[in-house]
Each structure stands twice: as C-alpha cells, then as structure tokens.
Amino acid sequence: MLKKVKVTNVHTGHTTITLVDTDTHEKALIACGMSSNETATVEDITGADERLQRMTSAKGGTEDRAQLFSGLGRCLERNITLTKALGLQVNRMKSARYKGVIAEIVFAISQGEKLSDSMVKYPDVFPDDILSLVMAGEEAGQLARVCKRIGIAQKKGSKIIKKLKGGMIYPAVVIVLAVAVIIAMSFTLVPAMSKLFLSFKVELPMGTKALMWLSDLLLKKPYMAAAPFFGLYVLFQNFGVITAIPRVQDLILKLPIVGNLVRKSAAATSFRTMAMLVDSNVRLTSALEITARASWHYHYKEFFTRLRNHINIGRNLHEAFLMESHWLGPDARTLCGMIELSAETGTGTEMLAEIADDYEEELDGLASQMDKIIEPLTMMILGVLVGFLIYAIYGPMFSLGDVVLGKKG
C-alpha cells in the first residue's frame, strides 16, 4: 500500500512530502529518513489516487540499487550497524518501492533475520545475481566489500542503460509517428481514394489493396486503431519474460548489431559476477554455480554450469573453458587464451576482472555509438514505409490515366 509521509522541520516549518510503498505506518516512518529535529505524519493513499501516483512517480531500478549498495558498503566498512546503515540510505532512494523495501528489510533484521533472507522476499528489487553475491559475501565475511563492488557494477550498468535508452528515443518516436500517420490516412485520405479507384474498375496493385483493406477494417472497427499501441505496451511490459525464452535469445543473437550488443552485455554481467565472487574468496565450484544462476542469458547460464561440472570431476579451469568455448561466440579463443595465461601466472582474479572490464568498455563504446548505428537503420525503415505509401497511393494513377484516355477516345 502506498503511503504519503509529510516530514516537517520543527525549526523552519518547512514540509517535505515522501511516498513510501509499505504496509504499516511504523515502516513508513522508518522509510522517510526523518531526523531528530523533524516530525512526520502518515496518510494512506488508496483508490484512483494510488494508481495515478504509481504511474507517475519514479520507478527506481538500477540507479537506486547502485546508490543503496554503494552507500551500504561504505557504512559497513566503517563498522556501522546494518540496520543503521540501511536507514542512512532511504533519503538517497528516488522510488517509493525502494524506500518501502528498505523499511521492510530493517524491520526483518530487527526480528533476527539475515540480510539475504530478508532480501529474497523482493525478487523485483533484488534479482538472482544480487542475492547470490550478498549470500556469498555473508558466508565469506566480506559483505562490505561485496556491497561496494555491487554498487560499482550497478553504476556502470546504469550508465550504459542510460546511453542505450537515449539512443532508442529517436527511432521509437519516428516509428510511433509513422504508425500514427498511417492510421490517420486510413481514416481520411484512403477512403476517398478508394472510391475513385474502384469506380474505374481496374486491377489495383497489391500495396493499394492492403492499404484499402486496412482502411476498411479501421472504418468498420475504429477501436482497432489502438491495437498497435496496445501491442507495444504489452511487449514492453512483458519484455523481460519474452527475452528470457531460449529461442528468442538465440534469434536476438543472430541480429546484425543487436546480437553483438546482447552478447557483450551478458558476458560483462557474468564475468563481473564471477570476478567478484572469486575476489571474495568464494570456492571456485560455488562461484561458478552462483554465476550460472546470476547469468540472464541461457548461453552463459549453460556455460558456467558446465564449467562447474568439469571442475567437479577434476579438470582445471582452462581445460573446461576449451571444452565449452562454443558457448562464448566469436570471443571464445581470446578468452581461452586469457584463462590459460592466468593459470600459468596465478592471476585468476585479476584476469577475470580484466575480462569483465574489457566487455564493459566495449559495451560502453557500443552504447555511445548507438545513435549513429540506429539512425541509418531508422531512416531505412522510414524510407521503406514512405516508399510503400507512395507506391500504394500513386501506383494506380498510371493505369487510371490509360482508362480515362481510353474512355475519351
């Protein structure tokens, strides 16, 4: 339930309103970050107002997660208690969801739960890779170090995601406008031209027939005009579920530009997780198992699972890499060479971190050039669309001229 907390400074009278997503007023007061010179009142937000607030308020995500773990790691390094360290982070959170989750975790820890046990209840906020790292940090006594590393990794991820989103704004706007123009023409221009074309009783091009069919459908069922936009909404709402399907992941990897971007993103996440676990003195087989669980692409999930199986039967990491290198795509030989070098020099942790850094730098570079890569593709799609409209509308004109001249003759 969403709650509105009004925090008032007793000296100045200045009031700040904070939204918190939690179930009790007590937890809402924990999540508002109230200091000793402030008072607070809590109100429940219900009904249409709650739905509106949820739609318009900040959603949180990678940014809030990065702030939470970097601040938590810094506090734990200075031996600040876990509950106080979590309480110090609430004012840094932008979303009501993250504020509420922190309050829930503080309450759970005060009841005797471990941090990882309280986090596992919120899979939408703490995905498997984060939970696996927190569990490993607790077991190894390296929670502060792991939290700091999670914060750094999340900040890098947030930076790359911002660049990718920035690059996708232009094509998204162009495609939405193009769909809107086609729908508007289907209601206005196409019906008028359809009457003209049909009155001459000539064979029409396939493109013109398709445009007339679409216009006829929208005129008879106007609500179908919302179908493309509803379809896009459903796609974005379920994007994570759809892209988790193995066949869809295989298809995406075959796309010219996007496939390379996805592969590097999955590799960067997986090898960064592996590097953090090994650096935290987690046993190799456990680190491989956790990395497999944390990998969001099934190629890397399968790869690290098979590595663990090879290690369990006595093979070394380099041999395992060579045997399963087909999962790694074009970079397989390079990665196997780096692992062999680390085995000879005893620098496994540094080499894994270097692999993750290389992938993140390449991904950052691709994200920075996203607008330059996407723009020509967008223009090509727009050109094809405009060409189709010109062909569909003006194509019949040439045959109509012959019909008109023939009738005059």
Image (cartoon, rainbow, N blue to C red):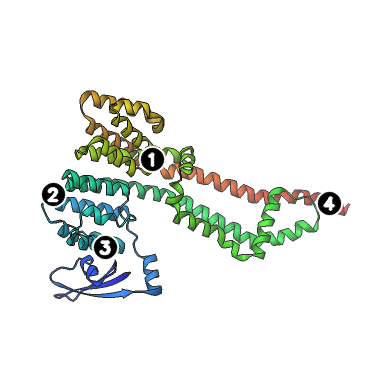
Q: Is residue 154 visible?
A: no
Circles 4 and 1, Cβ within 8 Å, touching? The answer is no
Residue named by callout 4: 405
**Amino acid type, residue under disc 1 in the picture:** Leu
Residue named by callout 3: 99
Residue named by callout 1: 366
Q: Is residue 51 visible?
A: yes
Circle 3 sits in a helix, a strand or a loop, which is it?
helix
Q: CA distance from mark 3 to mark 2?
A: 22 Å
Residue named by callout 2: 77
Residue in the image at 28% along x and 56% along y? 64
Classed neighbour count for the residue bearing mark 3: other residues with Cα under 10 Å, few (<14), some (14–19), many (≥20) = many
- The answer to whether residue 394 is left or right of residue 68 is right
Residue 139 drawn at (x, y percent): 19, 45
Residue in the image at 20% along x and 57% along y? 113
**Amino acid type, residue under disc 3 in the picture:** Lys
Residue 204 drawn at (x, y percent): 75, 50
Q: Nearer the viewer, residue 79 or 137?
A: 137
Mark in front: 3 vs 1? 3
Quarter of the image containing the N terminus? bottom left
Residue in the image at 27% along x and 61% along y? 101
Kindly give the residue lying farthest to the left in the view shown: 79
Name which of mark 3 and mark 4 comes first in the sequence: 3
Name which of mark 4 and mark 1 comes first in the sequence: 1
Circle 2 sits in a helix, a strand or a loop, which is it?
helix
Name which of mark 2 and mark 1 comes first in the sequence: 2
Mark in front: 4 vs 1? 1
